[in-house]
Every structure is written in structure tokens, then in C-alpha cells.
Image (cartoon, rainbow, N blue to C red):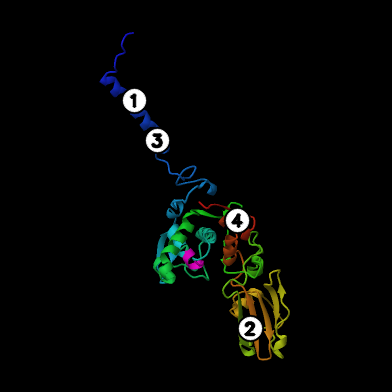
Amino acid sequence: MPRQKKPSSYSLRYLLGISLALSLFVFLLPVLTVRGEAVLTPKGDTTTPTSPNEFLAIPTSARDKGRVVKLLMPDGTISELSMEEYLLGVVSAEMPASFELEALKAQACAARTYTVRKQSFETAQHPDADVCTDIGCCQAYLSPSDAAQRWGSSAESYTQKIQQAVAETDGLGVLYNGSPIQAVFFSSAPGYTVDAVEVWGNQVEYLQSVESPEGDEVPNFRSTVTLSADEVKSLILNTYANANLTGDPSTWFGSPVTNQGGTVSSILVGGVTLTGNQIRTLFQLRSACFLVSWDGTSFTFSVTGYGHGVGMSQYGANTMAQSGSTYDEILTWYYTNTQVDFLW
């Protein structure tokens, strides 16, 4: 038999090179196939997604950062903030930062929608600004430093939580027939929210009474206001001079007409029919869900809930979030027949 030749040193080097190259290729294959892609990214354009459901990760707030809000400050100056900066201040002021993230996201969407709608109409109180910090006119607002002072040792974690709530809803709001709604909200409801027509006299299709799940776990959910007969008479006659408040004070108030949640729709006072909201304002009650009693010396108003009662209940939103509801489910529950989508 002929002797086999030993492989040359060149052939050995060649074979080793091929083996090493194949090994490196197999090792690097997973990296090469995903190079330059994040593990979690939007399906489409990373800055201008076309649907809120396209997000697979926390957005970058590109939409909010690109929209300017003119804010009238308490000192009379006007600050130009990005929508992101403004919403961080509104959510910090309007809802407890200890609330569930989904509730804070619902609040961010409601506040963003409210702001965009305000930008569409000139407000007589501040024609040169979109919004102000007066809650009687617009929304509450806290600067970052004021919010940090309020939160104390929790400032860092609460700030991050609210930043997340705003970022994860970047540009999103509540629409009815394609237009931003009047996204009003309040603190807590006595079992049901209130139709807008009961409070402001105008029927609004998406501001209807709905069940709200909060209860006695809410701080000051039940409160009382006690007034003397002279105080009640003075307050009523100063505003409603034609009311007849003579005779026994026990006869001044008639039986209230209430809705299914117990909120007073109307009540006869000295022969004048007033709404529950008018009574609430007149006697500075926490809500229009009240019972009034006379003990021979003074009137006591026993009140449940806090706020005007129309739109989204903040404590109700938090209770829903605790039960597993998402922010869009919360919003479309409180704002009837609406959709959550991009506002611009």
C-alpha cells in the first residue's frame, strides 16, 4: 500500500481557520439578526404612532414635548410650557401620587383632553393664555419644587411615577365623535356620578350618570356642616331675596328630589326651587349629596362624597384600577360612548 501523505502545515492552518470562522458565525448569529433593534419597540414609527394600541413599550413623550401650553401663573405672568411639563404639574396637583398607575394615567389623559379643548376656545378670564392655575376656572397646577415639598421623602418615587403616567399616555385623550370632550372630573361620588344637566343645565351626551365604586375608604367621604337658623336665612336671602323664611325653621326646607345615587337634583327652600348644586355652593358643602335636619337650634347637612359629581370620579378611578381596570377602560366607563385615541 502506498503511504498516506501527512497534511501540510498550510492545510492545517486552513482547516483551523475555516472551523474558527464557522464557530464565530454561529455564535454571533443571534446578535447579527437583532442588531440595532430594541427588544421592545413600537410596531411603526417610533415618534408618530398611528394608534394607541401600537405601543409595545413606554413612549418617549414626543407628542407632548412638541405641543406648547400657555399657562397664566398666579403672579399674572404667562409661562410657555410643553404639554409634558404642564401635565406633570397638573397630575401632581389634581390626584394623589399614591394612587394606582392606571388611575394616574386616566387622570393624565383627562387633563390632556381638557387642556386641548381649552386651547380651542378663548377664555374671557385669560384671553392671552390657554389655561390658568385657578381650579374655579381651569385645573390645579404644582411646580416641580412645590410638588417635591408636598411629597417630602417620597418626592423622587412619586415624580417618576407621574412621569411614567404622562409618558405612557403621550398625546392620548378622550374623544366623542372624533372631537376632544369636556373631560371634567371630581374627587369622589356617592355611588353614582351625576348627569351634566343636573349641575349645569345642559345635556351632554358623554357626561351621563354612571355607577362609581368608591366608598367609606375615601378620606372624609362623609362630612357634616352645621349652621344656625340665622346663618341659613342670611345666606339664602342674600342670593334668593324672594324666598320666604318666616315662621318655624323646620318648615323652610322641603323634601329633596334625588337621583339614584342620592344626590339632590332639586329642593324647595322657602318656596323657591333650588338645585342641589346651588345648595352645595351656598352652604359650602363638599357635594350635592346631602340630607338636611333641624334639631330646634341649628341645621345639620350630612354630606356624602366630594365635588360637583360630573365626569370621572378620581377615587372611583383608583378603585377601578385596584380591581384591574386599565386607564382606557376607566375613561370610557366614566365618559359614556367615548374613545381613547391621539388628540393631535
Q: Alpha carbon of mark 1 to alpha carbon of mark 3: how far?
A: 19 Å
Q: Alpha carbon of mark 1 to alpha carbon of mark 2: how far?
A: 97 Å
Task: Give the SS element for disc 1.
Answer: helix
Q: Alpha carbon of mark 3 to alpha carbon of mark 4: how far?
A: 40 Å
Looking at the image, residue 134 lies above or below residue 81: below
Task: Give the SS element for disc 3.
Answer: helix
The picture places residue 188, in percent across and down from the top left corner, at 59, 69
Q: Badges 2 and 3: C-beta atoms under 8 Å apart?
A: no
| Residue 95 counted in the magenta span | yes
**Residue identified by numbered label 3:** 32
Residue plotted at (52% across, 64% down): 99
| Dot label at residue 302 | none
Q: Alpha carbon of mark 4 to alpha carbon of mark 2: how far?
A: 42 Å
The secondary structure making up most of the magenta span is helix
Q: Badges 1 and 2: C-beta atoms under 8 Å apart?
A: no
Q: Badges 4 and 2: C-beta atoms under 8 Å apart?
A: no
The picture places residue 73, in percent across and down from the top left corner, at 42, 68
Task: Give the SS element for disc 2.
Answer: helix
The quadrant in which residue 228 appears is bottom right
Residue lying furthest left: 9
**Image side of residue 256 versus residue 87, left or right:** right
**Residue identified by numbered label 4:** 329
**Residue identified by numbered label 1:** 18
Extent of the magenta region: 90-96
